């Protein structure tokens, strides 16, 4: 029996619909795991070679714990060591808007700027190692997402903001905590955070991801654009991200001085918060004293978490709620 031509058209249309639906699901919803990030230490501790004098070492404390007796060699040889004077650890002080422990200092301030609430975390560190990034589900891949607050809790973050949402793109360099995950260029203007905590702005069309890694890049965020470079505003009043609206919730990070940073998130898209344009955000970052500042993923992704508390008021579509994203930038141990 010969089928009418219209049946072939219907069948072709149905197959095309199913294939298009699969492509959309694969692009935006179906998770693709590429790498599960290990949190276990891989390096073995160095072992001292045995010698005749170190073959047998026993440490014992006297009953009053005032001295330590170290026995080496025979049981009759003993030496009394005077214990080193310990320096008391700095006290950790936490309030609703601040954290301080001697190594990390975070102070939160809320500004009302151009009819928009802007949340600023001023961060000072004793070491660049406290500035970190993390993946959703501790996994590098596509369409793998969690809320910023969930990721922050999983890594015991003191402070966290959403990152560049790398998982929504198929290109753009991804270097996280010293590991290169993606080296396909998107031509973006990237933020490079080096091992010493300094910031740099590079164009992917001018340098490879491997060259950045070799130069000491510790984290590379591919979203942009740069907002402030060398203390000056780096965007024009008409610049915008893709098809984004002129005024949006925003997320940005900036450096003021050595190991002195600002994490910034603004509200938007509500009757009480207009949101900011890129230029307005850049002007605000400059007013904070940033030498370099960079725009991260904004809109419904914009979120800041401090000590397990969501600080801003994110808008996900028409609802007031956190959007799940693929990565965060955070402060923690």
Image (cartoon, rainbow, N blue to C red):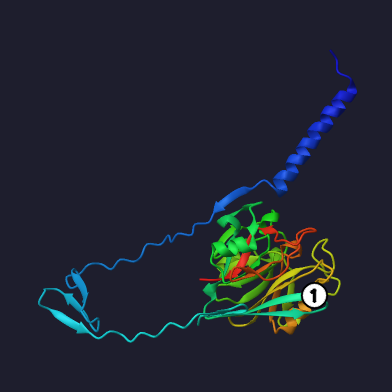
Q: Residue furthest left?
A: 76
Asked if residue 209 can be seen in this view, the reply is no
Against 142, is 315 above or below?
Answer: below
Q: Residue at x 81, y 76 (%)?
A: 280
Residue nearest the viewer, comparing 292 with 308 = 308
- Residue 244, by quadrant, is bottom right
Residue nearest the viewer, comparing 215 with 131 = 131
Q: Residue at x 25, y 86 (%)?
A: 82
Q: Residue furthest top?
A: 1
Q: Residue at x 56, y 52 (%)?
A: 35
Residue 242 falls left or right of residue 294:
right
Residue 291 falls left or right of residue 112:
left
Residue 241 in the image, given as x and y percentages of width and height: 79, 65
Picture quarter with the N terminus = top right
Residue nearest the viewer, comparing 37 with 276 = 276
Residue 215 falls left or right of residue 118:
left
Residue 107 in the image, given as x and y percentages of width and height: 62, 81
Residue 86 falls left or right of residue 169:
left
Against 230, is 246 above or below?
Answer: above
How many labels, in total? 1
- Residue 49, by quadrant, is bottom left
Residue 60 in the image, given as x and y percentages of width and height: 21, 75
Against 329, is 98 above or below?
Answer: below
Classify mark 1: residues with Cα within 10 Å, few (<14), some (14-19) or many (20+).
many
Residue 37 in the image, given as x and y percentages of width and height: 53, 56
Q: Which residue is mark 1?
A: 116
Determine whether the residue tagged by mark 1 lies in a helix, strand or loop: loop
Asked if residue 256 can be seen in this view, the reply is yes
């Amino acid at each position: 029996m010969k089928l009418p031509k219209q049946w072939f058209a219907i069948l072709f249309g149905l197959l095309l619909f199913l294939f298009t639906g699969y492509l959309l699901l694969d692009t935006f919803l179906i998770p693709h795991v590429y790498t599960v990030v290990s949190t276990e230490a891989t390096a073995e501790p160095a072992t001292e070679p045995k010698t005749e004098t170190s073959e047998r070492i026993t440490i014992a404390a006297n009953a009053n714990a005032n001295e330590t007796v170290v026995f080496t060699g025979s049981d009759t040889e003993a030496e009394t060591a005077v214990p080193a004077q310990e320096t008391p650890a700095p006290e950790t002080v936490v309030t609703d808007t601040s954290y301080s422990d001697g190594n990390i200092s975070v102070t939160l301030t809320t500004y009302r700027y151009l009819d928009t609430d802007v949340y600023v975390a001023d961060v000072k560190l004793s070491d660049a190692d406290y500035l970190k990034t993390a993946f959703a589900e501790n996994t590098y891949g596509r369409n793998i997402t969690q809320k910023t607050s969930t990721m922050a809790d999983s890594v015991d973050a003191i402070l966290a903001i959403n990152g560049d949402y790398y998982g929504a793109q198929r290109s753009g360099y991804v270097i996280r905590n010293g590991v290169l995950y993606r080296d396909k260029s998107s031509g973006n203007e990237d933020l490079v955070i080096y091992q010493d905590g300094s910031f740099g702005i590079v164009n992917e069309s001018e340098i490879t991801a491997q060259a950045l890694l070799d130069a000491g890049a510790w984290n590379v965020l591919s979203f942009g654009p740069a907002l402030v470079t060398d203390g000056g505003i780096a965007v024009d009043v008409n610049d915008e991200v893709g098809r984004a609206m002129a005024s949006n919730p925003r997320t940005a990070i900036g450096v003021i001085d050595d190991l002195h940073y600002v994490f910034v998130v603004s509200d938007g898209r509500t009757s009480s918060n207009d949101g900011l344009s890129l230029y307005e955000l850049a002007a605000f970052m400059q007013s904070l004293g940033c030498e370099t500042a960079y725009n991260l993923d904004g809109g419904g992704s914009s979120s800041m978490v401090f000590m397990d508390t969501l600080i801003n008021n994110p808008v996900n579509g028409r609802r007031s709620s956190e959007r799940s994203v693929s990565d965060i930038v955070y402060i923690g141990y």
